[in-house]
Structures are given as structure tokens and as C-alpha cells.
Image: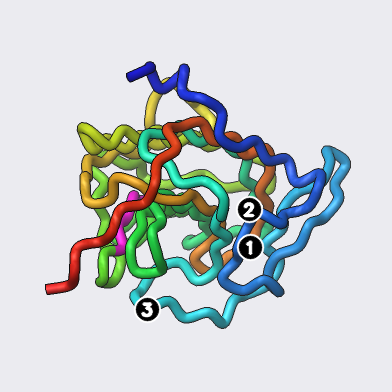
Amino acid sequence: MPALAELPLVVREDFENGADRWKPTVPESWKIVETPEGHVFNLHRDSKYRPPYRSPLNIAILEDAIVGDFTLTLRVQSTVKDYGHRSMVVVFGYQDPAHFYYVHFGKKTDDHANQIFIVDSAPRVKISTKTTPGTNWDDAWHEVKIVRTVDDGKIDVYFDDFETPVMTAVDKSFTWGQIGIGAFDDLGNFDDIELRGTVVKPTARPAAQ
């Protein structure tokens, strides 16, 4: 198996040609906007979507790529006024609305903020083994990287500094899935998304007990 740095390019998205490959929970909450740096995908309004289990309310899933191992990089900008729970999320291992992982980049850390979470037919549960006191959001753009290896279950999350992860977890529940972007209940912009990984076919989920 190649090193993660050598994984093939799956998707490079700069939103200069729209966002047709993305499926939001509420399409009206998202739009393409032009900025001095080019077009970005803008999450601009609250969502009335109610997921089957407690989890982010406003996400957009990349429809045409299912991966196992992957490296995901992107730029994220929070566009709300600063407050204690200011946050954005990145989704991965997404199989359906009741089965996925997500990273919550929250201003202040607690059991429900600034953690790696799993949604597995139940309200989200943190699986982080390492995190920080919080994600220092401001109005600037920030760079995010997520590295996932399914054989050992490792998840490493980076924020601005791509040398040292700010969050880590180990979990083998979901070995394939889609990626996504969004927020729990905040607003923001996304751009320059690059997904490198091993494209796989989805497998049937085990029947519920």
C-alpha cells in the first residue's frame, strides 16, 4: 500500500465551476459566492434540518467519491461573531445520516466541542484520545488536514500546523465513506478542498440487532 502522501488524487474542488457535486442537508442554506480570492462555498443561513440522531445540522456531502484511506485538506473560514461555542465541522466516513464521523473545531473544548465524534445509530459520542483547549477562531481563513488509515483505525487532525495533530482518535467502526463540510449551527466558507485516497465500493451495513 502506498504511503498516504502518495495516495492518488480523487477530487480537487475550488468551486470556480459551482458546487453540483455537493449534496447539502438544506440546499437553501448554501451558495457559491465570489471573493477577492475566487469563488467559495458559503454556508450562509441556519438549517431547519433535524438529523435522526444528535449531530451537525448543516452539512454538505461530496457525492461522487467513497474512500477508505485518505488525506483531506481544505481551507475554512468562520463568518459568525466570536462567542464561546464558535465552530465549524468536517465530516468523513459518511455512510448515511446515522453513520459517520466528524471533526468539530470548537472555540472551547468540552465533551461536545472541539473533538472527533462518531454518529453510530445514536447521538454523537466523542472518540478523541487527544485534543486542545480549543480552536482559536478569528475572521481569517484557516487550513485543515485530516489523515485516515482504516487498517489501524487512526484519525489525525491538523489545524494550520500540518506537522503536529491537534486531535487524534482510533476507531474502526467505519472503514469507508464520503467526506463533507459544514457546521453544527454556525456559518462559514469553504474552499480549496483536496481529497487523496483509495476509492472503494461501499459494503452492506450489518443488520441492526
Q: Which residue is disc 3 drawn over? A: 52
Q: Which residue is disc 1 drawn over? A: 187
Q: In which quadrant will I find the N terminus?
A: top left
Marks 2 and 1, how far apart in space? 6 Å
Q: Is residue 112 visible?
A: yes
Q: Position of residue 40 (x, y in %)?
A: 75, 49
Q: Secondary structure at mark 2?
A: strand
Q: Pointer 3: residues within 10 angstroms few (<14), some, or many (20+)? A: few
Q: Position of residue 38 (x, y in %)?
A: 84, 41
Q: Pointer 1: residues within 10 angstroms few (<14), some, or many (20+)? A: many
Counting residues from the start of the chain, the first of labels 3 and 1 encountered is: 3
Counting residues from the start of the chain, the first of labels 2 and 1 encountered is: 2
- Where residue 163 sits, quadrant-wise, is top left
At horizontal 36% and vertical 58% (from top left) the residue drawn is 100
User: Which region of the structure is painted magenta?
Assistant: 114-119
Main SS of the magenta part reads strand
Q: Which residue is disc 2 drawn over? A: 78
Q: Is residue 68 magenta?
A: no
Marks 3 and 1, how far apart in space? 22 Å
Query: Farthest residue in the left direction?
Result: 209
61 with respect to 172 (left or right): right
The amino acid at mark 2 is Ser
At horizontal 60% and vertical 63% (from top left) the residue drawn is 23
The amino acid at mark 3 is Pro
Circle 2/circle 1 CB separation < 8 Å: yes
Q: Secondary structure at mark 3?
A: loop
- Where residue 120 sits, quadrant-wise, is bottom left
Marks 2 and 3, how far apart in space? 26 Å
Q: Position of residue 51 (x, y in %)?
A: 43, 76
